Image: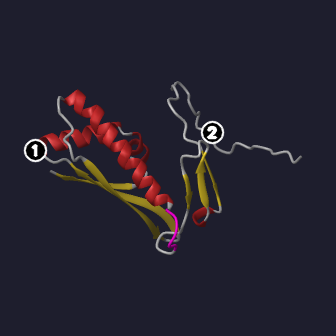
Amino acid sequence: METQTRITVIDDKINEGQKVLYTGKTHVSGGRDGFASSSDKRLQTKLGTPGNSPEGTNPEQLFAAGWSACFIGAMQLSAARLGLLVPDGTAVDAEVDLTAAAGSFSLQARLNVVLPGLNADQAGQLVTAAHNSCPYSKATKGNMNVQINIVV
């Protein structure tokens, strides 16, 4: 039996003072043209390089879907605090770009938030509050360019 050695190269004090509510666990092999599965087997998908693979999804699509779902949840929580209702038909269309400059890759994103029936002031308050509380938004602040557009 082969033994494995685990070496920690970065330790940002995971969980320090925080209660863990959920841990998503995945295993990916083969990189961008590989396969991803979650420990509970609910996610099992072939991965493909953006624009070059007719099969599978890619990390940018998965990130966009996760951020969109989280952002709607943040709007629902924020709406209760603001005395607003999240309207039926609320949606987030996320666009996550893989970019390259000077030999380095990065991400940038646009969240197009659809809030039918809210006026511009209400929608702006709600989106701002959600962006300040959404874990994905917090993780990206200062790390990538983000544009949020509101469609009312």
Vertical arrangement, residue 24 with respect to residue 29, above or below: above
Q: Secondary structure at mark 1?
A: loop
Please check the rendered image and state whether residue 149 is part of the magenta-colored stretch, yes or no. no
For the point 15% across and 50% down, the residue is 152
Residue under pointer 2: 11
Please check the rendered image and state whether residue 56 is part of the magenta-colored stretch, yes or no. yes
Q: Distance between the Cα atoms at labels 2 and 1? A: 45 Å
For the point 41% across and 40% down, the residue is 135
Question: In this orientation, which residue lies closer to the viewer: 90 or 135?
Answer: 90
Q: Secondary structure at mark 2?
A: loop
Q: x, y percentage for residue 119?
A: 10, 44
Q: Is residue 90 visible?
A: yes
For the point 55% across and 63% down, the residue is 47
Total number of numbered discs in the rendering: 2
Question: In this orientation, which residue lies closer to the viewer: 152 or 146?
Answer: 152
Residue 142 as seen in the image, left or right of residue 59? left
Give, as a three-letter code, the residue at label 1.
Asn
Q: x, y percentage for residue 44?
A: 57, 53
Q: Is residue 142 visible?
A: no
Please, what is the dominant secondary structure of the magenta stretch? loop
- Of marks 2 and 1, the one in the foreground: 1
Vertical arrangement, residue 15 with respect to residue 108, above or below: above
Task: Identify the residue at the far right of this view.
Answer: 1
Q: Over which residues does the magenta segment extend?
A: 53-57
Give the class, few, some or many, for how many residues have Cα within 10 Å of label 2's Cα (few <14, many ≥20). Answer: few
Find residue 119 and name its label: 1
Give, as a three-letter code, the residue at label 2.
Asp
**Image quarter of residue 9:** top right
Find residue 15 and name its label: none
Residue 70 as seen in the image, left or right of residue 88? right
For the point 87% across and 48% down, the residue is 2
Q: x, y percentage for residue 37?
A: 59, 51
